[in-house]
Image (cartoon, rainbow, N blue to C red):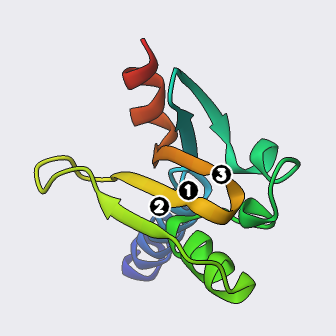
């Protein structure tokens, strides 16, 4: 009986771990006039967003392209909301989680 309970608990923990990975927050960009766009859609307009799924990927990608940029938090109180500027690509936008972007766009 104890072995059965232990196995059931282990399976439950695995489901929690995998479901957390499945529901990882995606990132979006907001233009100057509002509106949210996924990094996937933006990758068709600029190589800066090619194969980018997270903020860390974005930084690595811009660094690998050798572009000058700034990526700064909007303020210490606003978590997961950043100003991105890439002058050579004429990019100036707010980068945030998709859920934040949807809320800000309303």
Asked whether, in this view, residue 49 is left or right of residue 18, the answer is right
Does residue 44 appear in the picture of this structure? yes
Residue at left offset 17%, top offset 52% = 75
Instruction: Name the mark nearer the viewer: 3 or 2.
Output: 3
Asked whether, in this view, residue 88 is left or right of residue 87, the answer is right
* Residue that protrudes farthest toward the top in the picture: 106
Quickly name the residue at label 1.
19
Distance Cα–Cα, label 3 vs label 1: 38 Å
Residue at left offset 76%, top offset 46% = 42
Asked whether, in this view, residue 62 is left or right of residue 20, the answer is right
Observer-nearest of 62 and 21: 62
The residue tagged with tag 2: helix, strand or loop? helix
Which tag, 3 or 2, sits closer to the chain's start? 2
Residue at left offset 44%, top offset 82% = 3
The residue tagged with tag 3: helix, strand or loop? loop
Observer-nearest of 49 and 53: 49
**Around disc 2, counting alpha carbons within 10 Å, would you say few (fewer than 14), some (14 to 19), or many (20 or more)?**
few
Quickly name the residue at label 2.
16
Q: Are marks 2 and 1 in contact (CB under 8 Å)?
A: yes
Question: Which quadrant is home to the N terminus?
Answer: bottom left
Observer-nearest of 12 and 92: 92
Quickly name the residue at label 3.
90
């Amino acid at each position: 009986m104890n072995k059965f309970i232990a196995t059931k608990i282990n399976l439950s923990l695995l489901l929690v771990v995998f479901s957390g990975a499945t529901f990882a927050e995606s990132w979006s960009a907001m233009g100057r006039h509002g509106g949210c766009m996924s990094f996937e859609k933006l990758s068709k307009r600029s190589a800066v967003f090619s194969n980018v799924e997270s903020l860390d990927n974005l930084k690595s990608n811009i660094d690998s392209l050798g572009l000058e940029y700034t990526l700064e938090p909007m303020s210490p109180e606003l978590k997961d909301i950043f100003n991105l500027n890439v002058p050579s690509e004429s990019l100036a936008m707010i980068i945030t989680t998709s859920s934040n972007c949807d809320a800000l766009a309303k």
